[in-house]
Structure formats: C-alpha cells, structure tokens
Amino acid sequence: MIELESVSKKFGTTTALHQTDLCFATGKTTALIGPSGCGKSTILRLIIGLLEPNTGTIRIEGQAVSPSAILALRRRIGYVIQEGGLFAHLTAAQNVLLMAKHLHQPLGQMQTRLLELCELTHFPKNALTRYPVELSGGQRQRVSLMRALMLQPSVLLLDEPLGALDPMVRARLQDDLKEIFQRLGQTIVLVTHDMAEAAFFANFIVLLNEGCVVQSGTLDDLRNRPASAFVRDFLHAQRGLAAI
Amino acid sequence: MKSLLMLSAIFAFCSTAQAETIVVGSKKFTESYVLAEIAKIALQNAGFTVEHKPGMGGTIILWQALRGGEIALYPEYTGTIGEEILKAKEPLTLDEMRGMLRQQGAGMTGELGFNNTYALVMRRDRAAKLGIHKISDLRRYPQLNIGLTHEFLDRQDGWAPLSARYGLQMQNVRGVDHALGYAALANGSIDLKDAYSTDAKIAEYDLVVLDDDLHFFPQYKAVFLYRLNTDHRAVAALEKLAGTLDETRMTHLNAEAERTKNYALAAALYFGEKPEGVAGELARKIGRWTWRHLELVGASLFLAVAVGIPLGIRASRPGPVSDFILAATGVIQTIPSLALLALLVPLPFFGISAVTAIFALFLYSLLPIVRNTATGLQDIPTAVRESAAALGLEPRAQLWKVFLPLASRTILAGIKTSAIINVGTATLSALIGVGGLGEPIISGLNLNDYSTILQGAIPAALLALLVQFVFDGLDRVIIPRGLRLKQ
C-alpha cells in the first residue's frame, strides 16, 4: 500500500502537483493517466524519492519516505522508465545483477534469479552478454524490467514503459507484462498517456490534469459517469476504446 | 591524507639524495657554463664529487638557489653583485662587497682576472655606414632597431639609466633572447644589441663594440660566489683560480666552447687536459635526457590525475565552488611557464629542484583533466542518473559503478591531452637546471646551434607521439567495451 497525504510539488513557481491525497492498494495495478505535464510522472518520482515533496507525506507500507529511509525503500521498489535507463558500459546481465552484486548476494542465488527473470520476461538467455547498444528496443525494456524485479520488490513503478516501442513490439510486451503483473501480485503503479493501455493493465485508473486528480475509478466509471467535461473529452480523444 | 603521502613520496623519489655532492650552478650563457665547468674540474681535482646544473636562468634564480642551498656555488660578476644582489647605490670596494655578502651567508672568491662588462654591439658594416663608433653617436639615430636581452632591459645598471646618462631617446627598443639576438643582428632585423665584452660571438659575427665614452658600465670582474658553509678545502681550490683568466684567454675558451658545442671540453683546455672522446656519447646523453623527461612527465601527470579527477568530480556539481575550481585551474594555465617557475623558486620547499619542475607541470596538467572529468559527468543523461539512484545505490556507489565508467572516455581524453602538452612543457624544466630534453634545446639556443636544439626537439616530438600511442592503447583497456561499440 502506497499512501500520499496532502502531497504537493512545485518547480520554481510552477506547480507540478497540487495538494493530493492518493492511495495505491496492495497487490493491485493502478494506472496514472493524463496529458503531458499533468503531474503523473511527478507522482512516481516523488514515491521513489527522486523528488522531495513541498508539503505532505508519502508512506510505503506504513513507512514514511524520508532521506534516511530512502535507500532501504528504493531496494524494495522496482522502477522502469521509458528509455530503459540502462547503463551502456554494462552487459544485460551486469545491468540486472548490479545491485545484487553490490549487496554481496550469493553467486548461485543471483544466477538462479537471473534465469528465472529471463523466463518470466521472455528474454533470450544468449543475449545476456550483450551490451545495451546491441539490443533491440523491446529487449532493452525487458532488461530494464528484469533489473527492476531482481531484488523481488513489493512495489513496481513503471513510467511509460512501452512509450518508445513500435506497435508490434509494444503489443507483444503488453501481453507479457500483463501476465507478469498477474503472476507477481505486487503493488503496481503504471504511468501512461494511452487510455487503452491503462484499461488493459489496470482495474483502477487515476486521471490527472494540470497537477490535479480529475477522477479515479474503473474505466466504466470514467466512461459512464464522467466527473467533468475534461474527462469526457479525454476519453473521446482516445479512439478505439469502444472495443474494450 | 593518502594523496599527501603519495605526493611527498614522489618528491622524495625525484630529488634523490645528493648530500655529499657539491652542486655548481651557472647562468644561461656560454661563459657562465664554461666557468662552472672549470670550477667543477678544479673541485674534482681536489677530490670532491661535483654536479653541474647548467643554465638555471638569471641572477635572481641563481642567488636564491645559493641562499636556499640548492647550489653551493656559481660564477658571478662584481658589477652584478653590487647592483643586483646588494642593490648598492654607490660602487663598492671588494672588501665592502665581501662584508655585505657574508651577512647574507655567502662568500666571494678573488677575481678570476678578466672584466666581462656589458657592451653595445653592432654589425661592423652597418656601424661604418652610419659612422657610429661610440655610444653617444646613437643620439643621432633614434630610429635604430634595438633588440636587448630581457635582463639588460630591466637591470638597475641596464638600459634605462644608460639612456638617461647618454641622453638617448631610442624609439624602437624590444626584448629579444640573447642567443636569438645575434641571429637577428646578422640578418639585419635589429641594428644593435647588448653583449658581454668577452663574448665569442663578437668575433664570429664580425661585430664592433661601441665605445662607452661616458664610462657608464661598471666593472664586471668574474668571481665565484659560494655558501659560507662550503668545505674550506673546496673554497681553497676555487681561490687558486683567482687571477688566472685574462680577457684573451676567456674569449678563446668561450669561442672553443661554441665551436665544439662542448663546455666541458673548453674547461678542460683551461687545465691543459686532453678532453675525453665524445663520439658515441650522444646516444647515451639523449637516453639520459629522455629518461629524466619521462620522470618529470610521469610524476607530474600522476599527481594531476590523483588531484584533478576528484576536483573534476566536485566541479561537475553546479555551484560557486565548481565555478571557483574551473576558474582557478583556467587562470593557472594563463601564467607563462617561465614566470611560474620564477615565482616558485624562491619559496621554501621548492627552490631549484625537480620538485619545483614537477609542481609547475602538475599545475599545468590540471585544467584538461578537471574540465573533462566535470564535462564527462555532466553529460550523463538524467534518465541514467535517476536509474542509478532509483536502484538504491549509495551516492558513492553510483559514482564508482555507474557515473565514472560512463564518463571514462571523456576523462581519459583529458588525461591524454594533459600528457601530450606536458611532454612539451617539460622542456622548460631545463631552465631551472632540472634536465630533461629541454637541456639540449636551451643550450642549443644559446649556442645558436640547430643540431643541438634538434637533439632535444626530435626526441621530445617522438615522445609526444609515443604518449599518444600508449594512451590509444589504454583506451581499449580502460574504456568499457559497451561504450566503444558502434550503435
């Protein structure tokens, strides 16, 4: 469970997130959605402590996010970003194992976990020795996901994980991701700007605009009982939703 | 603290024990070299181990080195002692000079014999054409091109008071290196320069000495200055040289030194010795210079890496401290190397030694390393930075495991730039008698002898290429393979 209590964030004079209360339920997948600059990525970055809120508190499983607790908390959180954020000087395997090695985990345990993750993310084992520049975009995201899952985190944060992929690769990875989410049963927060993707992954959707939560609920709630004209317009702009 | 220890270890390594050796210094011109070699032989004959540090620069550097104990003695002239060292307003007697020097911890031998006073010289044909015979004749030609040594331009007994005495208002006066000035006289780019009256070049270039008709120039009798704590037997050996060198003999020795390009040989002539064969010695000498050069470059570069990378890491974070670091390393780069050496020499702990040369080279090597380290780190994309933090790595681990390897190509390029520049700059170490490939370059410059200059310049250029080659090899070892692959 992740709780945000009266959390706000300003960059200079611009308010990226107005005072917000939010709760992400344990073992559920929540999608944060909205147009560019609505504050959805800011929420993820606040949770993992890359940003400090101007007001309010964030709690992860009851523990407040603070400078002294952040290292330990981050190791219980997986974080995947759009371009993967892989380290170019390390191979796929080294990227995945970096943190485990830093924590001096037993070698055998690390190897077992690595093979498990290859299985889970459908990443070819023979590509583990390749460097990021030698991998395709989809493979890079799979490595990034493996790296995020390596320490068996209880929380997984994904910031537009499929945003930079072409449609074919994207569709395949969507299926794989959904299967992974269901198997792991973690608390998952996914940022996307695509309502179809949000609905595909998440049972609970939070729609943001200009730093405020506009409406939250299931896709049906948003579709049938829009809280404002913005919600209706936003859904209308996302073509092809009718099929879902 | 650790780097401090390392620093002193390197300095200790480079200024290897010379406790029992008498060190003779000399100024940067032929006669001073020859006199120092004569002193060396005289002391060796008296049973001492002697080292000659040739061409250490001008009066102030030598005098400071003598007072600081880096050298035990060097040849000097009475006029210079009175005007430059003791800064006397009136001419001093020899006894007055001795007394005042004694208070500063220095002794003075008897006069060697000749008077090497300053002189103004012109090409014989040019002087004849203009009808110039004495210095007061110059009043009629204020347009003459005059090229003076920097020392003569600035001396208390130099150009300004001479102009005042003679009422000269020369309009084209500039500073030119002594040895290069002769070439400039020969090809007509200057008409007049300063010289020493026993200078071998006067005969070689067929120059005339203008008559000092108002008796401006003081007496410049050659003596040796020595530290008072020098072994009295050594002083006795030096005193035996007094009165043994007249103008003719000195001019002859100077000419021999310049003709044979060998100061030791000229000094040996003074003692009537047959000099040892010099053939086949060149390779050994170049080897020694090159090795010394590598020591200077290696030690200073090592220090620059050890200090520059941490400074660069600090400077990669925005803020006033970073601005200061980058500005300071930049300013150091603008100080002329000769000026930096001159500033360092009088400081305690430095003096005329390899330490000074290494420290100066270290300062010059900092900028490319600091700047490239800072830039390399700043250029890491935000997504990668945040990924490293989000994994839960401590800031130190982020730096060592992610940021530094990612910036390694840029950092190494900075070190490579430093190393190559350093190979060139290190030639200046010879100015303070530390040696290296600058030694033949500077003495070649003094002798106006291109083959001697090339003996230093060619190995230095090859060394720079070698450094480049070695670093290209290091790229493969140090830069992670993932960064060298093409996208």
Image (spheres, coloured by chain):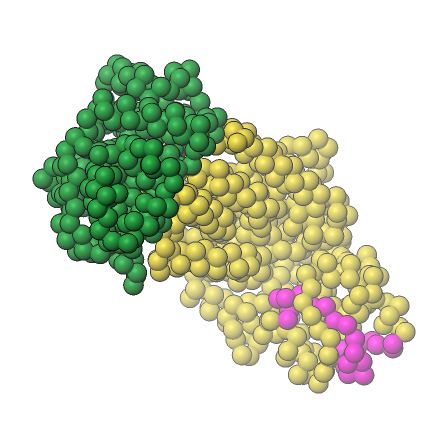
Q: Is residue B31 visible?
A: yes
Residue B134: say if magenta. yes
Left or right for B232, reference B57: left
The image shows residue B234, relative to residue A183, as above or below, that is: below
Q: Quadrant of residue A123?
A: top left
Q: How many marks?
A: 0
Q: Colour of chain B?
A: yellow
Quarter of the image where the C terminus of chain A is located: top left
Q: Could you say where residue A45 lies in the image, as x and y percent from the top left?
A: 27, 45
Q: Quadrant of residue B293?
A: top right
The image shows residue B448, relative to residue A140, as above or below, that is: below
Front-most of residues B120 and B487: B487
Residue at the left extreme, as displayed: A62
Q: Could you say where residue A135 lies in the image, as x and y percent from the top left?
A: 46, 26
Tell me what residue is drawn at x 28 percent, y 49 percent: A231
Q: Could you say where residue A15 lies in the image, as x and y percent from the top left?
A: 27, 59
Front-most of residues B377 and B418: B377
Q: Could you say where residue B326 lies in the image, as x and y percent from the top left?
A: 43, 56
Tell me what residue is drawn at x 80 percent, y 65 percent: B189
Q: Is residue B61 visible?
A: no
Residue B469: say if magenta. no
Quarter of the image where the N terminus of chain A is located: top left
Tell me what residue is drawn at x 30 percent, y 40 percent: A191
Front-most of residues A98 and A74: A74
Tell me what residue is drawn at x 77 percent, y 72 percent: B145
Query: Which chain: green?
Result: A
Residue bounds of the magenta highlight:
B130-153
Q: Quadrant of residue B417?
A: top right
Left or right for A194, reference B236: left
